Image (cartoon, grey):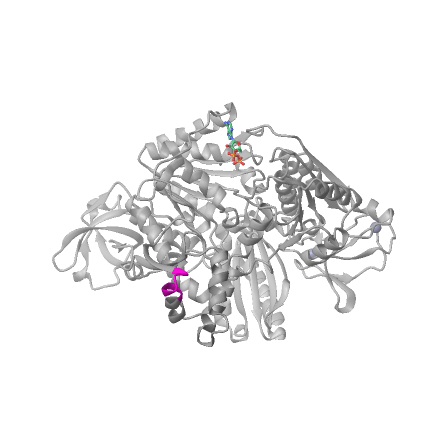
Amino acid sequence: MAYAKVIVELTAASLERPYTYRVPGALEHKVRTGSVVAIPFGAGNRTIRGTVVAMEEHADIPLEKVKDIQDVHDKVDLESQLILLGHWMKERYVCSLQAAFNAILPARTDVSARKESRVRLLLDPEALTEALASVRGNATLAKRAGVLEMLLEGEVRIPPEGVPSRRFLAQARTTQGVLQGLVKAGVLALSQVDTGEMPVPPREAPVERPLPLHPAQEAGLHRILDAVEAGRPDTFLLHGITGSGKTEVYLQAIGRVLELGKEAIVLIPEIALTPQTIGRFVERFGNVVGVMHSRLSPREKMDQWQKARSGEVRVMVGPRSAVFTPFPHLGMIVLDEEHEMSYKSEQVPKYHAREVAIKRSLMGGFPVVLGSATPLVESYHKALEGQYTLLTLEDKAVSGPDLEVEVVDMRQELLEGNKGILSKPLQEAMAGALERKEQVLLFLNRRGYAQAVSCRQCGHVMKCPSCDLPYTYHAEGRRLLCHHCGSSVKSPESCPSCGSVYIKAFGIGTQKVEKQVQKMFPQARVVRMDLDTTSTKDGHARILGEFSQGRADILVGTQMVAKGHHFENVTVVGVVAADMSLFMNDFRNSERTFQLVTQVTGRTGRGAKGGRAFIQTYSPGHFSIQAAREQDYGKFYRQEVLYRKMMGYPPFSNLLVLLFSSTDEKALVQGSRSLAGEMEALLESLDPKLLREQEVQMIGPAPANLSKVRDMYRQRLMVKARTYKFLTYLIKEFYNRMQADEKYKPLRVAFDINPMVS
Ligand code: ADP
Ligand code: ZN
Ligand code: ZN
């Protein structure tokens, strides 16, 4: 006898508790995991729909209580799809069902309260100054004066559409009483509005029309629409440089999806989700466009979710989490900038939006479009193998002034006596731009960066011979440590390649760059944008605003400046130290460098003025820098894929990273070694043929890149295997062993399969 576990409703409570039903003989070959079935339910035995999430041979309740499944539906509706998606995520990302549904469903909030009070500012700065003058010195109104000061100085900002009063009170650090006083005084207005408002002004009707397409765009669109109309779950990789017209292709494909009565999801990295980007969708499709972003309150998120479900919103633009938008007739998912790290969740469940999108497309019968100027090697490999369909846009959609990209050899600079951060050619170009009242952008890539040791004279980088990745410098004992395999050597006094003594740890911070730049150009207005300066809620937008309005001449920033912004007046761009990403001890270091340099150089040459980009490096001959300069993705890919193959990295393997942590360093080191040993033994006990097929390789344990965080010591262990599934099996084995033995008690473990930063 077969039994099915059935979930009847997409609510947290029922998801936790599937019901057991009997599969009658007549339906035996039709009912399986994923089926949508008709079942008798409740005391009255009314027929309802349910989703089968598991099949079992035995019933776990008394047999006389088990009812029969009545029928199987052919179509899997939205609700069932989301239920099945949760179950798939649980297996795929080795997490609890609850964690999976926490990612899929919006946080439960009181949705009956759809109104919220919003604060608007009624006065302009001049009137504010007057209002402040009138209360100054009045002791009883000191609090009110304080708020007025904050408003005047921009410490508290109220955009034209107002802010939720809750947020206003928090920002102004004040009370409801003071707020009411300011309303009475005519400074502020309070109003009740519907929640879920758009961050850009909504438009009733579209104002922009599709452009006549170029032949390559037309060809790509045609292929995508074929799949849309046939309901085929194809995955397309749309490869084209910035400005080649990818977004125009998405827009026209979405136009057709809407005509067919279906809906579309457009994923954009959060950092690129600017009013400019969102505006293009709103201008094309009007008020059916919804926007998700991380700054929405739970209630606003719930509101977007319900509008999508009810059909009020039909195009959802948002970051990673928008992949779960509950559209009932989903017709396409677009992932723009598919190479972006932010598509991978860093919290449990550690899902990748691309994988979820493809899973949804298989369930719903519609295509996925991945777009990028610099696709991940994994994605491009799949496209060449035929798993994805490759669509290429070779040229810019609108030809503009030519872009000049110059690679500056910093070794040469040193020979000529320049020990500063900025090379002569970059300095000269900056001076010229400032003279002409144009702007300058300087980049530093810091993400995932650890200190490598390199030679300023010849560019030689100290690498671990067995991992072929840069060693990390540890000042303690002046040693070089490989954070992959744990091997270590003494830091050399002179360069093993050229004998120079200019060999040392390499690192520059944005602050240091800002200082040097300011010293070199004392008249220039310099602003800095990095995690420090953007940690406040609006810091990011404020700095970009200042710069784009011309209130600053030079912007120094991390890669967060590189995305989704378009500065007309920027004519000089500098990558201050391309080697920072090149020297990361991560197998993606060349890929990251290629992405960064391509992206940065893509910034210039967009305005009418054209521009120059300077890539400063100690490794000017490195293929990823050369290929980026020539804007030649193929050249980069062919070289990189050889390295991945030789070293057995993705796409030729899957990678499991286990991070053990403990406050007890000794227990941690011993525990992680002993676990690695137990796994070694497990592997040896497996069928040798399987082992050979999987090409399993264990690397480490070794101190993690951040080897101590908030009093927790951290050790990392990596396992490479051919298939993803084998790694999920190993995770379960790790868990079992850790639970079985007391000595692992002080250890905590976090794991990630195919992380974007290993
Ligand atoms: P991408 O998304 O690849 O960066 P976009 O779609 O944003 O490229 O296009 C870049 C610019 O070229 C935009 O201003 C867009 O309006 C314009 N554009 C795109 N396709 C065409 C076309 N077929 N004809 C004219 N202009 C186009
Ligand atoms: Zn190593
Ligand atoms: Zn050297």
**x and y, in percent, of residue 738 in the image:** 51, 69
In percent of width and height, residue 297 lies at 40, 58
Q: Furthest-top residue in view? A: 215
Image quarter of residue 663: bottom right
From what the image shows, is residue 668 above or below residue 568? below
Which residue is located at x 50 percent, y 47 percent?
A: 269
Q: For residue 152, say whether it is visible.
A: yes
Residue 579 lies left or right of residue 67; in this view the side is right
Q: Quadrant of residue 227?
A: top left
**Residue 27 placement, left or right of 594:** left
Q: Nearer the viewer, residue 413 or 148?
A: 148
Relative placement, left or right, of 52 versus 418 is: left
User: Residue 183 lies in magenta, yes or no?
Assistant: yes
- Tell me the quarter of the image containing the C terminus: bottom right
Total marks shown come to 0
Give the left or right position of residue 494, taking residue 59 as reference: right
Any part of residue 621 in sight: no
In the rendered image, residue 123, in percent from the top left (x then y), is placed at 44, 56
Q: Which residues are magenta?
A: 182-188
Figure check: 607 above or below 165: above
Give the camera-side residue of 521 and 380.
521
Q: Is residue 77 above or below residue 260?
A: below
- Taking 57 as reference, is 569 above or below it? above
At x 56% / y 28%, what residue is drawn? 398
Residue 498 belongs to the span the image colors magenta: no
Q: Quadrant of ligand 2?
A: bottom right
The residue closer to the viewer here, 346 or 660, is: 346
The x and y percentages for residue 665 are: 62, 73
